[in-house]
Amino acid sequence: MPAEHSSAHPFPGDGRVAVVTGASSGIGAATARRLAADGFTVVLGARRMDRLTPLAQEIGGTAVALDVTDDASVASFVAGLDRVDVLVNNAGGAFDAAPVAEADLDSWSRSFEVNVLGTVRVTKALLPALRASGAGDVVFVGSTAGLVSYEGGASYTAAKHGVHTLAETMRLELVAEPVRIVEIAPGMVKTEEFALNRTGDPAMAAAVYQGVREPLVADDVADCIAWAVTRPHHVNIDLMVIRPRAQAAQHKVHREG
């Protein structure tokens, strides 16, 4: 059981173990770097060990292969952990931009398997350790797509709405326990892979951000995650919505030129 900390001071990273899923790139990689800089011992999980291993070496963390869609992979990942204080459920993604009338059910299945079921699978497996820490944090990296729907995004918005209600439900279920449930919901974030994975076309991916002055980057989201998990532990950041200043809403984006 960790020592008590004064409510006047941030909850320290030193001595705490943070697990970050989907840590091989984008928001996950940035979060791993930031938490390590804040004193956390970071365990990085992802499928692409060729990316994960050098990042773990860079920040003094541990790289462990993890496929959140596979029961055996999650079980193996969890079996190697002695302690977990923070879980950052970051693994996810968007895989198409088709209207519902043209839905590719394989893409829908992939979206739910990674974003929703993968998140449930990892959270369920690590919850005993988070409870045992005496001061656990579960962070869901959601999206503004989990709060507002938009055309051409149904497979992703439906999945992220699932993540949003998962966070809300767990907060209700664990209210009597020493585990915080935090949801971070970014808007437009420019990363190397998100839009490309969704469109499959580099030109279409670039067009998503065309004319947008200073979209969010992965480090912006990582900064918010780190801030949330270092608040005094009686303080719960239920939901933090983060957008670039150029994006007033899902459908309202200022583009220069």
Image: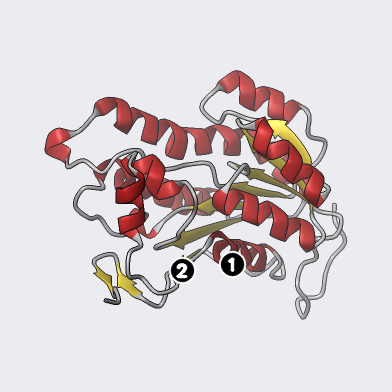
Outermost bottom residue: 8
Horizontal relation, residue 61 to residue 189: left or right: right
Where is residue 141? Give x, y as percent. 51, 53
- Percent x, y of residue 213: 40, 74
Residue at 65% over, 40% down: 127
10 Å crowding of disc 1: few (<14), some (14-19), many (20+): some
Q: Amino acid at mark 2?
A: Ile
Q: Earlier in the sequence, mark 1 or mark 2?
A: 1
Does the CB distance between marks 1 and 2 fall below 8 Å?
yes
Residue with the mark numbered 1: 224
Which residue is located at x 30 percent, y 32 percent? 108
Element on which disc 2 rests? strand
Q: Is residue 94 visible?
A: no
Check disc 2: other Cα within 10 Å, few if <14, some if 14-19, many if 20+: some
Alpha carbon separation for disc pair 1 and 2: 9 Å
Q: Is residue 151 above or below residue 253?
A: above
Q: Amino acid at mark 1?
A: Cys
Residue 170 position in % (x across, y down): 51, 48
Task: Provide the residue designation for mark 2.
Answer: 242
Secondary structure under the numbered disc 1 in the rendered image: helix
Q: Is residue 72 visible in the rendered structure shown here?
A: yes
**Image point 56% across, 53% down: which residue?**
27
